[in-house]
Image: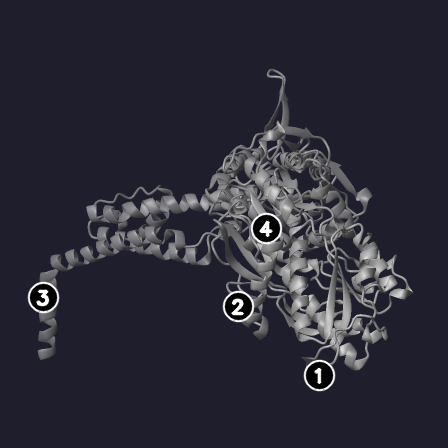
Amino acid sequence: MSPFGLLRVVVVVWVWSEGIIGNAKDIYETKDNNIECKSKIIVNIGGLIDMSSRVGKEQKIAMEVAVDDVNDQSCHKLALNINSNAHRNSSPMLAADLANSKQVQVVVGTKLDAATLFHSIDENSNDVPIISLASTASPETTSIPLPDFIQMGHDVTLHMHCIASIIHQFHWRKVTPIYEHNNFYTSHSQILTTLSYSLRLVNAEIDHHVAFPSISSLSNPIESIEQELTRLKNKSNRVFLLVQSSLEFATLLFEKAKKMGMMEKGSVWIITDDVATHLDSLDSSVTFNMQGVIGCKTNFMETSQTFKRFKFMFRKRFGLEYPQEENSKPSIFALRAYDVVWIIADALKKTQRNKISLSENILHSNHEGLSGKIRFKDRMLLDPPTFKVVNVVGKGYKELAYWSLGFGFSENLVEHKNATTCGGSARVLLGSVDWPGGLKTVPKGWVYNSTKGRPLKIGVPAIDPCPQFVNVSHDKRLNETQFTGFSINVFESVVKRLPYPLPFVFVPFYGSYDQIVEQVSSKYLDAAVGDIQVVEHRYAFAEFSHPYVESGIAMVVKVKPNRSKETWMFMDAFTKEMWLLMGIMHLFIAFVIWFIEGQSNSELQSFGAILWFSVTILFFAHREPVKTNLARLVLAPWLFAILIVTQSFTASLSSMMTVSHLEPSVPDIQTLLRTNAIIGCNKNTFLVQYLVDELKFQPQNIKVFDSIHDFPRAFENKEIVASFTISPHADVFLATYCKGYTKATFLKLGGLGFAFPKGSGLAIDMSRATLRAIESGEVKKLEENMWSNTNCGSTNSKIQNEQLGPQPFFGLFGICGAIALFGLLAAIIHFVKRNAETFVTFISLLHLQRGL
């Protein structure tokens, strides 16, 4: 007998809302909301369930338990008619046939979608509700004109947002989705689109995806799984997301992944609700293969008396009907199937009273079921679920956190409820995760895969505007291309700090900098190394490491000596305070020498002689002899101080004469634009387009050069008035051509970095290694070594325009002053002792004069 024939036999023909009177009546009295039931109204429910899956088996048992409960407590008698051959391809057609012929009053299925039904439903199906228990990722469900189609499962977008939050929590950038076709969830194309959107919100993306046919359609599923896992193992990404799968497929997948060593340290496996919800019912042999897996499962309350009673009845019936299943604990899919029967029963009671269609009454349900609160809006569940984030450990799993849309992660359910009801902010994901292989630290999610059989191909700009940064040359003696320069040295230093070996080979690239970045994007090159400026438009093609050198855009021009300031330039070598302090100290020292030597040295007795002495000692040209040891003690440190100050004055004045008081020949960019001046720029760089688009220079006024070392000749020949380059190159230019040029940096940029394909885990590892190289001082040492090979040394130690003040000399002046003060006091004491009798006689005479 065909399924339709079977359904016609058991269909009841009396539906109160439609006025159809059936032949079957149960004449006995029961109470339904205090209404005396003289007879039971028989309503037939068509169930389209895939009995080949664990989910279908659970839903069948759950609906049967619900039907028994409803029939014991309601004036309606529900007759459940399940079609066990309802596969995905046939379910929509069967549902449409049942609805069109009105063989049943309600259709419930796990593989129904509005888009497919729309083309099969006709007008005869009016008021026959079709309820889908599957989640959906299709945003068009509410726009399809099927008023009697109701989506009982949550929008799968919520599941994808939960997964994306986990990805973001651990800072992974790429994931590899794995899915099985034709399961009870929505189509793979829709779910991948939804996943891709959710990942973009957290700055992550899909690396590649793997699709499997339905496990029931595979002649050798183990071999098919092994082939695809082998391909995955040969790739670098290690964050695997089982985004859509039946429990049967997931069991085989993890078993094979375990045998192939893909459940060891460094791997990340994440499962969604369709597998995670069955963790309570998995055998220990299955969980053994899933150690370290993270999953998100829909949370539901398991403490109510209603749930406990349902669980008892479910396990009893499930164990009897499916003894081959080792665990009989119900999942969220079973609870949802149980709830849908009660919703139908409640809607039937309302239909009997208010004469509104059954579909409308279902859509106006406000039911607190085992699976949570059930309300509908636009024919879809209104209240978003709360997910429990779990980690498979041992024979079961441990709970890490709770997650819901809009509130993120919370440590426990009480905290999460407080956050959702009070508007508080949930905390981040808590709890220690046991990762695959027993790893306690968060896996990187990416490894360099040496199984590719070749080293990384690193592109290097062959025509670099600054050879000090990158220089590509060919050694004829060795017949090999050599790559040298500061950027190359930094890259090699950073690679040594990676936690794993990274074989690579440099490849010269003869295009522009933008083109080399685009070659990285197309994966012709695995990375690009050099003085590559990190700018916004290049992020469309690649990702960059942390900058190893700060950068900006600089304008280099010739300097114009300011003749009006050169006459008294020597006065600017010291500050006014320094000149004043020098004068006071010098006169004080001269006075002390005169005081000490005045009585015994005839050449230093006059005031003019001591002034001349103070002048000559500045140049160490004094001929007046210093006879006393005390005077020599005072003079010696001061002569040393004069030597130091004189040398400092000479250095400062020399610097100012060469650089400090030299003004640029062109004051600003506006002058260049106003005068229509010709400017220079390095070709193959982003600056050419930047000068035209942003600074509004005319293309014909821009002259391009291969190297910054071509600029001096162009300046001397008056081919250009100014040149534009990035500031690190400008620093090298000024350090090479010490005099006659100056620069002005007018825009800060993102610095110089290394380019990698978008989403590359290597970019993150290289960024960390770059920071370690910077913090260790290695990058600074390499930079200083580069400056040592230029004519003028590092521009970081270039001549400053600041005057010398007294601060550097306070210590030296303090020593000289203290010694001079000591000499003065000693001289005074000696003078008093030597003339003591004279003082006594003088004082006695004063007393006698006062007495007279």
Residue, far top: 477
Name the secondary structure under disc 1.
strand
- For label 4, count other residues whose C-alpha is less than 10 Å away and answer few (under 14), some (14-19) or many (20+): few
Q: Quadrant of residue 16?
A: bottom right
Does 730 appear above or below 122?
Answer: above
Closer to us: mark 3 or mark 2?
A: 2
Q: Which residue is mark 1?
A: 35
- State the image coordinates of residue 60 (x, y, percent, origin top left): 68, 58
Which residue lies at the image location 45% right of the left edge and 58% below the top edge?
A: 576
Alpha carbon of mark 3 to alpha carbon of mark 1: how far? 138 Å
Q: Earlier in the sequence, mark 3 or mark 1?
A: 1
Q: Quadrant of the C terminus?
A: bottom left
- State the image coordinates of residue 249 (x, y, percent, origin top left): 65, 44
376 or 490, which is in the foreground?
Answer: 376
Closer to us: mark 2 or mark 1?
A: 1
Q: Which residue is mark 4?
A: 323
Alpha carbon of mark 4 to alpha carbon of mark 2: how far? 26 Å
Does 351 appear above or below 763?
Answer: below
Q: Please name the amino acid that badge 3 sits on.
A: Val
Disc 4 and disc 1 in contact, CB within 8 angstroms: no
Q: Which residue is mark 2?
A: 303
Q: Earlier in the sequence, mark 4 or mark 3?
A: 4
- For label 1, count other residues whose C-alpha is less than 10 Å away and answer few (under 14), some (14-19) or many (20+): few
708 or 627, which is in the foreground?
Answer: 708
- State the image coordinates of residue 757 (x, y, percent, origin top left): 66, 41
Alpha carbon of mark 3 to alpha carbon of mark 2: how far? 114 Å
Name the secondary structure under disc 2.
loop
Q: Which residue is mark 3?
A: 840
Q: Please name the amino acid that badge 2 sits on.
A: Thr
Number of marks in the rendered image: 4
